Image: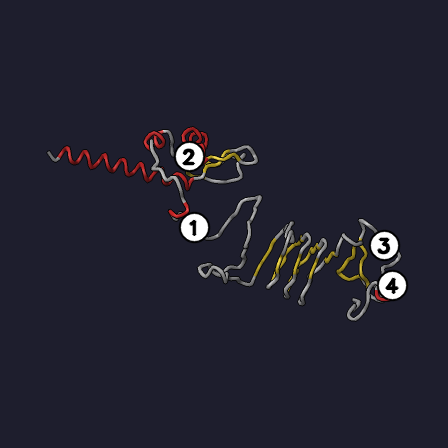
């Protein structure tokens, strides 16, 4: 494969690489040029016109500092060992980023697997544990999030963050309007097997604020927000039990 070190590729393009005589090897919009050595042997790299980027078709190792500002398509295994920055659209079979940053819209498309092997910690938040993948902004996931271990989330429940506190009323009516079911997910769902839950339409009648309609038109329940309702209902029942005990003691 040709060695471009120390060369001005624009000025010595034809003397460094051989793009061949085939129409498939002509650098035109919508087509890619395969980089070849002096004997005509094709490499794993294909070039596109400006804006169409570079295609790497086999295992690729990028060990230095690398910035990719266009469309990068890697169909084999890719290892970025330096402080690589991908600021365009990135699509790959299996990408391993060792200390690399993916900035801007850098990770628009990931068709198979992303493995991030170095850990990160937060200097501004010492309670944050080291992780294989750290996201400092918002994370949007179009599909399901599946975890092999527990999913841990800490809600902000500090009273200093809350105004207009009111004890939940009518918990007896709310709980009596709901039914707990065991059921089996049907073929129209994206789930399998047996499960436990409530019916979203029932919850919507008494607690509409914790029921959301998804993009597919189906209703979803924020089960976590049922907990404070159940707490207050248990407290109400405990008060009734204590009252009955006091009556019987006379």
Reply above or below: 194 against 53.
above
- Answer with mark 1 or mark 4, whichever residue precedes in sequence: 4
Q: Position of residue 161 (x, y in %)?
A: 41, 47
Decide: few, some or many residues near mark 3? Use Cα within 10 Å; few <14, some 14-19, many ≥20: some
Numbered circle sitting on residue 14: 4
Callout 2: SS: loop
Decide: few, some or many residues near mark 1? Use Cα within 10 Å; few <14, some 14-19, many ≥20: few
Reply above or below: 187 against 11.
above
Numbered circle sitting on residue 26: 3
- Residue at image location 83% in from the left, 63% down from the top: 10
Residue pointed to by mark 1: 154
- Answer with mark 4 or mark 3, whichever residue precedes in sequence: 4
Q: Nearer the viewer, mark 1 or mark 4?
A: 1
- Answer with mark 1 or mark 3, whichever residue precedes in sequence: 3
Find the distance from the CA under tag 2 to the CA under tag 3: 62 Å
Decide: few, some or many residues near mark 2? Use Cα within 10 Å; few <14, some 14-19, many ≥20: some
Callout 1: SS: loop
Find the distance from the CA under tag 2 to the CA under tag 1: 24 Å
Q: Position of residue 122 (x, y in %)?
A: 50, 61
Decide: few, some or many residues near mark 4? Use Cα within 10 Å; few <14, some 14-19, many ≥20: few
CB of mark 1 within 8 Å of CB of mark 3? no
Callout 3: SS: loop
- Answer with mark 2 or mark 4, whichever residue precedes in sequence: 4
Numbered circle sitting on residue 198: 2
Work out which quarter of the rendered image holds the C terminus and state it. Answer: top left
Would residue 89 appear left or right of 145 to someone viewing this image?
A: right
Q: Nearer the viewer, mark 2 or mark 4?
A: 4
């Amino acid at each position: 494969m040709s060695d471009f070190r120390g060369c001005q590729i624009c000025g010595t393009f034809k003397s460094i690489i051989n793009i061949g005589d085939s129409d498939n090897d002509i650098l035109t919009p919508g087509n890619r040029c395969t980089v070849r050595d002096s004997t005509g042997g094709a490499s794993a790299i294909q070039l596109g016109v400006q804006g169409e980027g570079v295609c790497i078709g086999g295992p690729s190792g990028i060990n230095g500092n690398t910035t990719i500002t266009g469309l990068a398509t890697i169909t084999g295994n890719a290892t970025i060992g330096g402080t690589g920055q991908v600021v365009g659209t990135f699509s790959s079979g299996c990408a391993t980023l060792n200390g690399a940053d993916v900035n801007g819209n850098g990770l628009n498309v990931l068709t198979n697997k992303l493995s991030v092997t170095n850990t990160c910690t937060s200097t501004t938040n010492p309670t944050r544990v080291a992780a294989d993948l750290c996201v400092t902004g918002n994370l949007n996931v179009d599909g399901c999030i599946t975890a092999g271990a527990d999913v841990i989330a800490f809600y902000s429940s500090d009273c200093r963050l809350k105004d207009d506190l009111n004890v939940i009323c009518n918990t007896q009516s709310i709980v009596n309007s709901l039914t707990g079911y065991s059921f089996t997910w049907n073929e129209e769902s994206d789930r399998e097997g047996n499960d436990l839950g409530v019916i979203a339409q029932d919850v919507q009648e008494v607690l509409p604020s914790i029921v959301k309609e998804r993009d597919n038109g189906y209703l979803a329940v924020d089960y976590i927000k049922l907990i404070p309702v159940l707490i207050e209902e248990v407290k109400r029942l405990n008060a009734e039990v204590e009252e009955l005990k006091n009556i019987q003691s006379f």
